[in-house]
Image (cartoon, grey):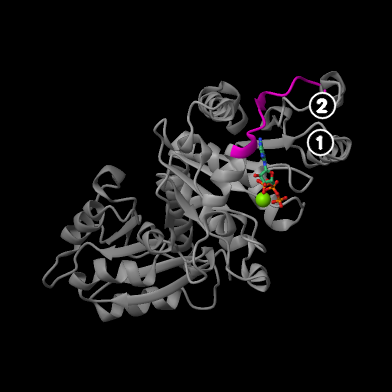
Amino acid sequence: MPDQIRLLVVEDVPQVAQYVRGLLNSQSAIKLLDVVSDGSRVLGLIGELRPDVILVDALLQGRVKGMNLVAQIHQSGLQVPVIVLTVPQQPVVADPGNGVHGVLAMPFTGYELISRLQQVNQTAQVADNTHLARMITIFAPKGGVGKTTLAFNLAVAIGQLPMKTVLIDGSLQFGDMRALLKVPMEAPSLLDLPTDRIAESDLADVLWRDPSGIDILLAPPRVEMAEMVTVRDLEKTISLLRRVYEVVIVDTPAVINDVNLAFLDTSDTILEIVTYDSTAIHNTMVVADAFRMIGYPPTKVRYMVNRADSTGGFDPEVLNRALGRVPEHHVSSGGALVVRANNEGIPFVLADPDAQISQDIARAAAELMVRPAVAAARR
Ligand SMILES: Nc1ncnc2c1ncn2[C@@H]1O[C@H](COP(=O)(O)OP(=O)(O)OP(=O)(O)O)[C@@H](O)[C@H]1O
Ligand SMILES: [Mg+2]
């Protein structure tokens, strides 16, 4: 059951524990992970069991008393909401500022228990989402137009602003970032993240810390492993990264499939790379139609013309007419600088910040971060 709420109960009175177990029998909305009677074990168990909500008896005895445990969980920064279980004679006030996200007074029905758990879980998720990172997915319906090169350099340029930036290698089959950075086969990938409640501490072991200052979540090392990545796990990973970072950049392959749609759906901005090339423009039009059908607002997509100075005899006006607007960003050809930087696995924006192409990327990075359209699209 993917959407089950994972519950940890801290209760030292066997009858009450039995009562709660009974209420949660034969229902599937809540998954009871464990009932523990020793409050001092709870902080350790949170990392292990990854509960979505913890139910704590206010009258818990032992080394760590009930309300002390609530305070400990709150101060731990683990950000797991707590419901306090109490008796009418000992009222407890719900106060998220003090780590009490909900209260249940004995006796309560199964319906009351489950709906309180759902409400607290829901509120916690909404609160989580209020300061989410901005997410930009680099996309193109045609291969080889520069997505990976631009995604990497743009992420580094945004990191220089400075903003805490993570780059997701969304080209799951071929792992373009792996190739570009020449990371060893055994470097961990997004498949190494746990699939249940992912915690911030899991990220440290899995992310590739690039010398350029950004963190990179690599694709699996082998083609066939791409199929092991589910949209659901991916969404959880994205949601965690958006809580930990200020900006999430995604490099994608030139396909429209479930995984790419998951990236595109959750993005604030789709940065679509176009070139002066009739196939690229044709495919861009087809995709614009598809995006309209899906219901993406036009402001969600921003166009970036790559190699904008090499029109190859193409009239830019043809592109503008096809897109129905002037593209928002233009990036020049970088020639040997790009080839050299890519071969060395370093970003050209750091190798030669004064080059025209580096300046173009720096400008795009700044514009992408300030443009109100980004915030508007998110709303
Ligand atoms: N502005 C540019 N100036 C010079 N070379 C560029 C530029 N943009 C991209 N390239 C070169 O074009 C090639 C393809 O780029 P890249 O791999 O980034 O494209 P892609 O869209 O990610 O391809 P794929 O569809 O295979 O994922 C690379 O060799 C890269 O160095
Ligand atoms: Mg690529």
- Read off the magenta span: 324-336
Compared across the picture, whether 94 is left or right of 118 comes to left
* Residue at figure coordinates x 84%, y 18% from the top left: 317
Q: Quadrant of residue 224?
A: bottom right
Say which quadrant the C terminus sits in: top right
Q: CA distance from mark 1 to mark 2?
A: 8 Å
Residue 378, relative to residue 117: is it above or below? above
Return the residue at label 2. 323
Tell me, yes or no, whether the highlighted magenta stretch contains residue 317. no
Residue at (46, 73) in percent of width and height: 24
Q: Which residue is mark 1?
A: 288
Say what secondary structure mark 2 lies in. helix
Image quarter of residue 325 = top right
Does the residue tagged 1 have its C-beta within 8 Å of any atom of ligand 1? no
Q: How many numbered marks have been drawn onto this rendered protein structure?
A: 2
Quadrant of the displayed image that contains ligand 1? top right
Residue 266 image position (x, y, % from top left): 61, 45
Describe residue 44's horizontal placement relative to residue 184 as left or right. left
Q: Is residue 102 left or right of residue 143?
A: left
Picture coordinates of residue 270 (x, y %)? Answer: 66, 37
* Residue 362 visible in the snapshot: yes
Within-10-Å neighbours for mark 1: few <14, some 14–19, many 20+: some
Name the residue rendered at 43%, 73% in the picture: 32
Q: In the image, what residue occupies the spot 49% across and 67% down?
A: 184
Mark closer to the observer (1, 2): 2
Classed neighbour count for the residue bearing mark 2: other residues with Cα under 10 Å, few (<14), some (14–19), many (≥20): some
Q: Amino acid at mark 1?
A: Ala
